[in-house]
Image: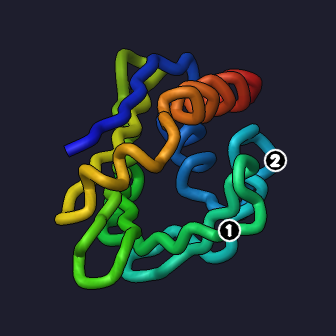
Amino acid sequence: MKRTQVALDIAAPPETVWGLVADASSYAAWNSTVERIDGVFALGKTVALYAKAMPNRPFKLKVVSFEAPRRFVLEGGLPLGLFVGTRRLEVMPQGTRGCRFEMEETSRGLLAPLMARVIPDQQPAFDAFAADLKARAERG
C-alpha cells in the first residue's frame, strides 16, 4: 500500500481552516495545485477535481465520510476495486487559537502496485496544498 501524507500546525481557528478545506468551490482561489472542483463535499456526493498538473483529466472522487467540522474522506479509482485511492482531510483543534491539519492518501487494490509505479510522487502536491492552506487561513 502506498501512502502520502502531510501534517502541520496552523495559527488560525479550526472553523477557518475547515471552511476552506470543506468548500470545494473555493479551492482554485487559494490552492495552487487545483484548477477547479465541480461539485460539493457532502456525504455520498461525487466531485470532479481538475488538478493543475493534468487540467484536462478530471479525477472523480466520492465523499465516503463527512464529519463536519472535523474530517472528510474521498475515494476514487478503477471499477471493481482494482485500484482505490482514499484521501482523508482532518482539522483538529489545538490550543486556544490554532489547529492541526492532516491530509493522508492511501491506495489499495489488485492493481495498486502497478499504479504506484505509474502515478507520479504526490508529496510535492501535498506539501504545496498544506502550505497554501496555512497561508490562506493565517491571512484571515
Above-or-below relation of 96 to 23: above
**Pointer 2 local density, CA inside 10 Å: few below 14, some 14–19, many at least 20:** few
Give the residue at x 35% y 46%: 116
Q: Are marks 2 and 1 in contact (CB under 8 Å)?
A: no
Among all residues in the image, which is located at the extreme right? 29
Mark 2 residue type: Ala
Give the residue at x 41% y 18%: 96
Q: Depth check: give the residue in front, 102 or 95.
A: 102
- Residue that numbered label 2 is attached to: 29
Mark 1 residue type: Arg
Tell me the number on the disc at residue 116.
none
Give the residue at x 25% y 72%: 82
Instruction: Point out residue 94 in the picture as x, y percentages from the top left corner.
Output: 36, 21
Instruction: Point out residue 13 in the picture as x, y percentages from the top left corner.
Output: 53, 30
Above-or-below relation of 44 to 96: below
Q: Quadrant of the C terminus?
A: top right
Q: Which marked residue is nearer to the observer: mark 2 or mark 1?
A: 1
- Residue that numbered label 1 is attached to: 57
Distance, label 2 to label 1, CA atoms, is 20 Å
Residue 64 falls left or right of residue 62: left
The answer, for residue 27, to whether it is visible in the render is no
Residue 63 falls left or right of residue 112: right
Instruction: Point out residue 119 in the picture as x, y percentages from the top left corner.
Output: 47, 48
Q: Depth check: give the residue in front, 48 or 117.
A: 117
Give the residue at x 70% y 23%: 135
Q: Mark 1 falls on what kind of element?
A: loop
Q: Depth check: give the residue in front, 132 or 82.
A: 82
Residue 107 falls left or right of residue 49: left
Above-or-below relation of 48 to 14: below
Q: Mark 2 falls on what kind of element?
A: helix
